[in-house]
Image (spheres, coloured by chain):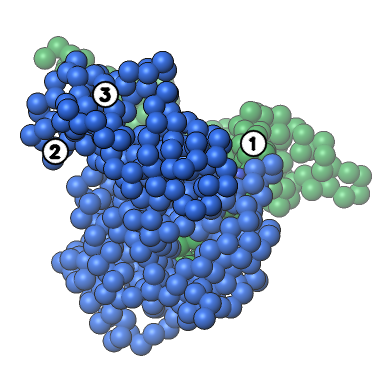
Chain colours: A green, B blue
Amino acid sequence: MLRRAFSVSLILLYFSFILAPIVLMLIGSFGEKWFSTLLPTGFTLDWYVQLFRKAMYTRAMVMSLWVAGLTVLINGAVSVLTVYAVHVLDSRRIRAAFDFCLLLPIAIPPVVMGLGMIQAYNWKGFSLVGTWQLLLGAHLVYTLPFMMRPLMANIEMIRWSTLEEMSLSLGASLWTTIRRVLIPNLLPGIVSGALMTFAMSLGEFQLAVMVTGSKTQTFPVVLYQAFYVSTGFACAATVLMVLTSLLALVGLSLLGRSFSGEAVMGS
Amino acid sequence: MNPGSGKNGVELIGVGKLYGSTQAVRGVSLAVREGEFLSVVGPSGCGKTTMLRMIAGFIEPDAGDVLIGGVSMKGVPVRGRRVGIVFQNYALFPNMTVRENVAFGMKVQKRPQLQIEETVASLLAMVNMADRADSYPRQLSGGQQQRVALVRALAIEPRVLLLDEPLSALDAKVRNTLRFEIKRIQRDSGITMIYVTHDQEEALSISDRVALMRGGSLEQVGTPAELYSSPASEFAADFIGVNNILRGVYEGGGKFAWNGRFFTVETPAEAERNPGARAILTIRPERLVPAEAEYDGPNALEGRVAGRIFLGPLTRVALAVDSPDGETLLLDLLNAAGESAQMGDLLKVRFAPSDAHLLF
Ligand SMILES: Nc1ncnc2c1ncn2[C@@H]1O[C@H](COP(=O)(O)OP(=O)(O)OP(=O)(O)O)[C@@H](O)[C@H]1O
Ligand SMILES: [Mg+2]
């Protein structure tokens, strides 16, 4: 009984720790004033109206979605190919190199990576710093392990090399084998990798603040600035961010499920 | 006619494969007739899988040639060989139902839909899996998965079916039924099968011929009866079944000397060319029979019962023979006799000259 009560309160504590700030933001975004009171006073939709009126914020949101979407697509394609190659080649040395490369982006803090990128791609007369392409590059590297790892676990779990040999022996071409057998069986890995990657890219702040310019700011960067405008406005911007993120993640997992459902039906 | 050159026969000519410094397969020449059931047995690492994979086309031999239907397979990719494969771990496609798995090969061959459906239905019925057609592999037991894997390979009407230890992952009971199911399918369909196993008992029970491998080479190829009763080497005598192996000297004139005893043995004519040579006499445990105490004919041995194992229909007795090396012989007694042999009992046994096999 006591143990049960203890674990229930731990869980409640956990959820309130995560959810309380978000709930407060949600309340704050509808409040007229929030100054030296526990909760805001008055009700207004004005902050949201302002948010969508200011081009800086909508543009930043579009930029965030654009970069996150591209990161998922490019890293997804690169990862499927790489994981396939590493698995099929079945060489211990290549595997060690692969594992090492995946460790790098995790071992190097984003701040260090951002500073390094500024140093490396900022030449006189031609600079990549401030372009969305550089941010995309940074995010590609930063999120790569989170796409590769689930895929690698997935391809090993299904013991792909045997399945491939089986498919070839049944007369299928390599292309048919990849399309009809590999991709459907890799979908769980692709979906979980995509979710992780998208969420990380969308919310990434350190790299974005360092390598983007005024025209290419992403939403987390402008969100940070919003707190200098007013609390209510910042709350509204935060809520928008959380909502977009949730919607995108739910959408991605639904998409993944419908694809794998189709594959399961044998199309 | 060349035995390997039937339309669906397989022939290996001096096939070899080197992995780094390991000669996985060396100079294997073997002809498998169309419609034959050939088992490949041998200890772990002797090259069975490597040989099978060269026939399938997953690896290219670096010496010799593989012929299917009399045609060299050099440069022919896996999918061009029409060779069916069954692996130990079933390797069903997890994203497809049983039906889709079996239909896969015919689908990529673009067979008409109606024909595909009919074939799948009859194949699944053949292995009693018709009612599981819409299950996914993960919902099936190992034995059921292997049944599906078997008919999936048969669905493409392969010229030869290669099986690599298909039953090793299954429990004894399932293994036994499935083994004879495979044999029945082979007999009914007349398909050429090459069946790799490390279970020599399995090989003896279902094969037309057995190929015994050792260290990458073929040690002996023959019918199960030939391998059992006339092993070509000590290795074969030891690997196939249970054997008593007596190391001694061939004295000539059908006399074999062992530990100060002399046995009368049947010898091939050419044995007379080397009297005085070291030789090995092999005797199967069931060929040693109890003798009356007053028996004083040839080939008698006396010893004490030093161990006994109950094997169901018979009892295997370890007999410690009175000899300087303290050798132990195994003999199989049918149960009534086996029960009466108690530990420490003095037992006299004998064997007929034709029941022992002499090797040089
Ligand atoms: N890809 C490989 N790379 C290096 N050596 C290999 C490779 N495949 C097999 N070998 C070696 O070749 C030899 C034969 O291997 P193989 O798998 O053919 O044996 P096997 O008879 O099938 O054994 P088992 O009964 O254990 O399955 C072994 O010594 C093995 O270590
Ligand atoms: Mg093997």
Mark 2 belongs to which amino acid? Leu
Crowd tier of the residue under label 2, counting other residues whose Cα lies within 10 Å: few below 14, some 14–19, many 20 or above: some
Displayed quadrant of residue B164: bottom left
Label 3 CA crowd tier, 10 Å (few <14, some 14–19, many 20+): some
Which chain is indicated by disc 2?
B
Question: What residue occupies the far top of the structure in this picture?
Answer: A2
Nearer to me, A197 or B90: B90
Residue beneath the point at 42% across and 17% down:
B325
* Residue at horizontal 25 percent and vertical 50 percent from the top: B175
Location of the C terminus of chain A (image quadrant): bottom left
Please give left or right for residue B194 compared with residue B278 in the image: left
Q: Which residue is mark 2?
A: B334
Mark 3 = which residue? B302
Give the residue displayed 60% in from the left and 72% down from the top.
B73
Q: CA distance from mark 2 to mark 3?
A: 19 Å
Quickly name the residue at label 1: A96
User: Residue A220 at x, y = what percent?
Assistant: 56, 40
Three-letter amino acid code of the residue under disc 1: Ala
The residue type indicated by label 3 comes to Glu
Q: What is the C-alpha distance between the residues marked 1 and 2?
A: 59 Å
Q: Give SS at disc 1.
A: helix
